[in-house]
Image (spheres, rainbow, N blue to C red):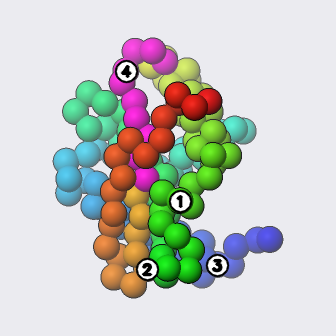
């Protein structure tokens, strides 16, 4: 099923709110919406020397759909990890930089952000 324009726009707004929030926390934007045949990464940012791969989730009503952490399935985690490896290889950074995988949940009610550091790892794959 194709997402409606409204849904796509809400996603773009949520990603921008998450990016703004993370930058206010000291992270530096490297790139957004990195795409490859293996998947997509919403935001890639730096925190000090670390490279952070970030999945952004927008939530209208958490009681109905669960938390952001719950919404990132093992299959989605695997896609993000594979895309991150592709990115690292392309940038000649594989095994040369510390990385982690975070999730940012953005409330569509008030654009409040909840940041989950180290939300998932490569250990289970």
Label 2: how many residues lie within 10 Å, few (<14), some (14-19) or many (20+)?
some
Near-viewer residue (92 or 81): 81
Residue 97 badge: 4
Residue at the spot x=26%, y=38% of the render? 47
Q: Secondary structure at mark 4?
A: loop
Is residue 102 inside the magenta stretch? yes
Choose mark 1 or mark 4, whichever is in front: 1
Q: Is residue 53 visible?
A: no
Quarter of the rendering occupied by the C terminus: top right
Residue at the spot x=43%, y=46% of the render? 119
Q: Which residues make up the magenta segment?
A: 94-103
Q: Secondary structure at mark 1?
A: helix
Label 4: how many residues lie within 10 Å, few (<14), some (14-19) or many (20+)?
few
Q: Which residue is mark 3?
A: 5
Q: Whole-Å distance between the Cαs marked 1 and 4?
A: 28 Å
- Whether residues under marks 1 and 3 lie with C-beta atoms below 8 angstroms apart, the answer is no
Residue 108 badge: 2
Q: Whole-Å distance between the Cαs marked 3 and 4?
A: 37 Å
Q: Which residue is mark 1?
A: 70
Q: Whole-Å distance between the Cαs marked 1 and 2?
A: 17 Å
Choose mark 1 or mark 3, whichever is in front: 1
Farthest bottom residue?
A: 109
Near-viewer residue (46 or 121): 121
The percent position of residue 80, horizontal first and vertical second, equals 58, 41
Label 3: how many residues lie within 10 Å, few (<14), some (14-19) or many (20+)?
few
Q: Whole-Å distance between the Cαs marked 4 and 2?
A: 34 Å
Q: Between disc 1 and disc 2, whose residue precedes?
A: 1
Q: Between disc 1 and disc 3, whose residue precedes?
A: 3
């Amino acid at each position: 099923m194709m997402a409606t324009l409204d849904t796509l726009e809400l996603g773009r707004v949520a990603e921008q709110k998450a990016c703004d929030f993370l930058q206010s926390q000291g992270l530096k934007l490297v790139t957004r919406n990195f795409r490859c045949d293996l998947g997509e990464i919403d935001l890639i940012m730096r925190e000090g020397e670390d490279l952070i791969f970030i999945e952004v989730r927008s939530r209208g009503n958490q009681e109905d759909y669960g938390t952001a952490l719950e919404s990132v399935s093992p299959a989605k985690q695997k896609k993000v990890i594979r895309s991150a490896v592709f990115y690292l290889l392309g940038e000649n950074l594989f095994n040369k930089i510390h990385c982690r995988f975070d999730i940012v949940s953005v409330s569509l009610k008030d654009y409040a952000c909840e940041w989950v550091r180290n939300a998932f790892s490569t250990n289970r794959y």
